[in-house]
Image (tube, rainbow, N blue to C red):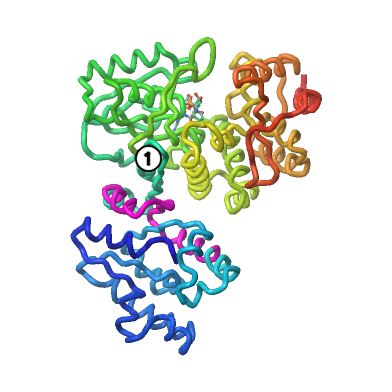
């Protein structure tokens, strides 16, 4: 209720040259009276039976109308079954906005705010279970703009889901499903495909394209020199403005290829095809691209949103186990930021499956949608990173992978947050996934000095991200030097 289904269906139908049918309005026409009076007189059971008949009939029509479904229609097993043959779009709306739009109009289930919120929560899980596509709250034309991507779903492997990402500087579809890489699925479909990948990925996860740029693997090649190599290869391949850079690989390839796409001929489109867990849950989304300088990581870069992200969890099957572990630290970080169902799932301790990856994607996209340029909310994504970066730097970027250092940084952040039971639970989770809970090879002083340098860079403040509880994470906290020293000392195994 109140998500804008009727308006969305009309705009989509107009774009398709099809008819839009609103199941509530159609039901009223057949009943010969408003839904409210029928509902109040005959009761919900009777209403649902009539609704089920109608919706199943509408879904069997061959003239393919766009159907705006009544909010409760999915309660019927028959309706859910009939929907499997169709593309189902879930238009998200937050409960407060839905109440604002739906209340005061006599709707039988929108009369009491408490009951309404409860119903909203119960139904969301049902919607998610059948949705092929999820569109965040947007303007009335989002559905129409998403239409080409919705149509592209038809040529994607069965079971592929679409999540619509929107940020201030642009919007794009995220396709998530097994088999996308094997099918070399790319969206948008126009333009030549210039695949940028690294040697390991080219061997493990071959991807079809028109031209290939294969860079050396590893952070040490995410440099201006690496970018020059890739840019010149693009130029030699005759890449033009209408072409598409397809970045197939982990965060290194994604950041490097995204940066090249941002600056090549002042910017061409690129698609992220993330093949590591870090990239699938984090780095492929949000449009931060760049390369390192000897003076600092990610010191040169640009914001450049991808044209699409194509995420295939099957790619993780060839990933070395230590890389999978490193990515798991970002999963735990994201689940702490999200709280709710994602944290509930992650704390059970299983491997990061498609549902966990989806939860992480949506969390990251929601954070970026609020603050693309990192001026406020987006800083929560740095949870565990201040000390994590310092540990990486203090050990010469050689001893710990980024994710491993973040794991240790998370434990420091949770101690500084004063959340000791949560810290113990997270420590167990990290250890069970092969991640370190302490570091060696650098002194506490060296790590603190590097944190201090971070502080100088950000104008004298110690911008710590702290955790009140899963789902309640906030940036910009000052911490006392003594507390910080003790928290770092605790994870220094010497
Ligand atoms: N842009 C962002 O928002 C953002 C966010 C987080 C991290 N990052 C960046 O991401 C980078 C780290 O990314 P990463 O952890 O993915 O590392 P990575 O790209 O170096 O990949 C790790 C290793 O796995 C190999 N590999 C990748 N996919 C494989 C597969 N499917 N099968 C076999 N081998 C495979 C790679 O060749 C590499 O050797 C860092 O540079 C970091 O700065 C960026």
Quarter of the image containing the C terminus? top right
Total number of numbered discs in the rendering: 1
Q: Nearer the viewer, residue 449 or 393?
A: 449
Left or right: where does residue 100 sit relative to residue 308?
Answer: right
Quarter of the image containing the N terminus? bottom left
Q: Is mark 1 within 8 Å of ligand 1?
A: no
Q: Residue at x 39, y 43 (%)?
A: 174
| Magenta region, residue range | 121-149
Q: Residue at x 51, y 72 (%)?
A: 110
Q: Few, some or many C-alpha atoms within 10 Å of disc 1 (few <14, some 14-19, many ≥20)?
A: many
Q: As displayed, is residue 289 above or below residue 376?
A: above
Left or right: where does residue 29 sit relative to residue 433?
Answer: left
Q: Nearer the viewer, residue 293 or 327?
A: 293
Left or right: where does residue 285 sit relative to residue 33?
Answer: right
Q: Position of residue 30 (x, y in %)?
A: 30, 84
Q: As displayed, is residue 16 above or below residue 155?
A: below
Q: Name the image quarter holding residue 275.
A: top left
Q: As displayed, is residue 86 above or below residue 271?
A: below
Q: Is residue 134 magenta?
A: yes
Q: Nearer the viewer, residue 239 or 71?
A: 71
Q: Position of residue 470 (x, y in %)?
A: 66, 46
Q: Name the image quarter holding residue 399.
A: top right
Q: Residue at x 54, y 44 (%)?
A: 352
Q: Residue furthest bottom?
A: 41
Q: Is residue 70 magenta?
A: no
Tag 1 residue = 310
**Residue 441: in sight, yes or no?**
no
């Amino acid at each position: 209720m109140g998500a804008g289904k009727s308006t969305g269906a009309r705009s989509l139908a107009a774009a398709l040259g099809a008819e839009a049918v609103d199941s509530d309005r159609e039901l009223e026409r057949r009943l010969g009276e408003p839904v409210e009076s029928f509902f109040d007189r005959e009761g919900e059971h009777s209403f649902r039976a009539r609704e089920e008949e109608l919706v199943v009939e509408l879904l069997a029509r061959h003239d393919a109308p766009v159907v705006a479904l009544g909010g409760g229609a999915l309660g019927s097993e028959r309706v859910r079954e009939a929907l499997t043959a169709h593309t189902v779009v879930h238009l998200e709306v937050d409960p407060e906005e839905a109440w604002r739009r739906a209340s005061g109009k006599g709707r039988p289930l929108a009369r009491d705010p408490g009951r309404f919120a409860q119903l909203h929560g119960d139904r969301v899980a049902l919607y998610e279970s059948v949705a092929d596509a999820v569109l965040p709250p947007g303007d009335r034309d989002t559905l129409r703009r998403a239409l080409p991507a919705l149509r592209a779903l038809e040529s994607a492997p069965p079971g592929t889901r679409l999540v619509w990402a929107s940020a201030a500087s642009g919007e794009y579809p995220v396709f998530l499903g097994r088999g996308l890489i094997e099918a070399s699925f790319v969206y948008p479909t126009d333009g030549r495909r210039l695949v940028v990948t690294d040697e390991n990925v080219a061997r493990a996860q071959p991807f079809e394209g028109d031209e290939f740029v294969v860079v050396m693997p590893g952070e040490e090649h995410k440099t201006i020199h690496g970018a020059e190599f890739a840019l010149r290869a693009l130029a030699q391949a005759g890449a033009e403005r209408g072409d598409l850079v397809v970045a197939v690989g982990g965060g290194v390839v994604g950041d490097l290829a995204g940066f090249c796409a941002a600056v090549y001929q002042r910017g061409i489109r690129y698609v992220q095809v993330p093949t590591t867990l870090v990239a699938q849950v984090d780095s492929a989304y949000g449009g931060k691209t760049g390369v390192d300088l000897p003076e600092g990581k990610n010191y040169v870069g640009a914001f450049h949103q991808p044209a699409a992200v194509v995420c295939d969890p099957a790619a993780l099957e060839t990933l070395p186990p230590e890389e999978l572990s490193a990515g798991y630290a970002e999963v735990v970080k994201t689940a702490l930021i999200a709280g709710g169902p994602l944290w509930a799932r992650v704390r059970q301790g299983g491997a990061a499956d498609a549902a966990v990856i989806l939860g992480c994607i949506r969390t990251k996209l929601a954070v970026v949608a609020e603050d693309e340029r990192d001026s406020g909310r987006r800083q929560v994504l740095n949870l565990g990173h201040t000390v994590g970066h310092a540990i990486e730097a203090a050990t010469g970027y050689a001893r710990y992978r980024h994710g491993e250092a973040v794991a240790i940084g998370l434990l420091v952040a949770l101690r500084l947050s004063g959340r000791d039971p949560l810290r113990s639970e997270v420590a167990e989770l990290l250890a069970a996934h092969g991640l370190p809970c302490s570091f060696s090879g650098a002194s506490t002083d060296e790590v603190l000095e590097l944190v201090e340098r971070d502080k100088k860079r950000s104008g004298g403040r110690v911008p710590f991200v702290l955790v009140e509880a899963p789902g309640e994470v906030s940036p910009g906290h000052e911490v006392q030097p003594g507390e910080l020293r003790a928290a770092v000392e605790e994870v220094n195994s010497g």
